[in-house]
Amino acid sequence: MRLPVALLVLLVTLVSVPAAGAIVDLPLDPQPVRGNPAERLADTPIEDSEYDPATRCVRMRRPGVDAMVSWLQAKHRGQHWGSYRCELWGEDSASLHAEGRAIDWHLNVNDPADKAAATKLIRLLLAPDRTGEPQALARRMGVQELIWDCGYWSAGMEDFRDYRDCFGKDGITPRKKVSPTVAHRDHIHIGMTKAGAMGRTSFWRSRR
């Protein structure tokens, strides 16, 4: 099931509030990033911004996830911390890890080099291409969700919002004790669409 982007944004708004300060320092007026691999595909059709919810635990090989891990290992600082984890939230509701469609990419926000690498990676994924298509690389790869340093982004959002697990029931007051892993301060969570996870989006098809 695919959720319309407008509905997705509404749902995210209900569970989180705008960050008081920039969690990930995204430019107010995003510009193309030099070296963006999405540029070589700028003249081909691009995927819409979509979000595929996870509903159950399915352990199976996801070639697009494997390709994403290989791309990260070849191009970016950090380490792969895993993809599959059977994490159910309720009836027909689960973490993207439960379907093997999420990657935990280890970077430590307290390490200046790691923090800079995380910001660089996120900006690259969410930068427009030379034709003005927003979040071009994320869309072409099938990246639908990012969580880093108590910040949350999903397809259709223009900026990060506060990640609710870092805050109290009011969604505003920071929790006094949150583990670095829950806060995503020791890794970036990279969630993928079903097509992206299977390697069926334009970026992965172009590499075959």
Image (cartoon, rainbow, N blue to C red):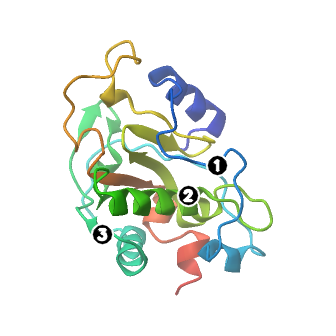
* Mark closer to the chain start, 3 or 2: 3
**Label 3 packing within 10 angstroms: few (<14), some (14-19), many (20+):** some
Query: Three-letter amino acid code at disc 3?
Result: Arg
Residue 167 horizontal/vertical position (percent): 33, 23
Whether residue 89 is situated above or below residue 149 in the rendered picture: above
Residue 2 horizontal/vertical position (percent): 55, 44
Residue 123, labelled with which disc? Answer: 2
Quarter-of-image position of residue 79: bottom left
Quarter-of-image position of residue 92: top left
Can see residue 101?
Answer: no
Task: Estimate the spatial distance between the alpha carbons at disc 1 and disc 2, rounded to whole Å.
Answer: 9 Å
Q: Label 2 near label 1: C-beta < 8 Å? A: yes
Q: Residue at x 52, y 43 (%)?
A: 154
Residue 27, labelled with which disc? Answer: 1
Query: Three-letter amino acid code at disc 1?
Result: Pro
Q: Residue at x 36, y 78 (%)?
A: 70
Q: From this viewpoint, which residue is outermost toward the bottom?
A: 208
| Residue located beneath label 3 in the image | 61
Query: Which one is in front, 131 or 156?
Result: 131
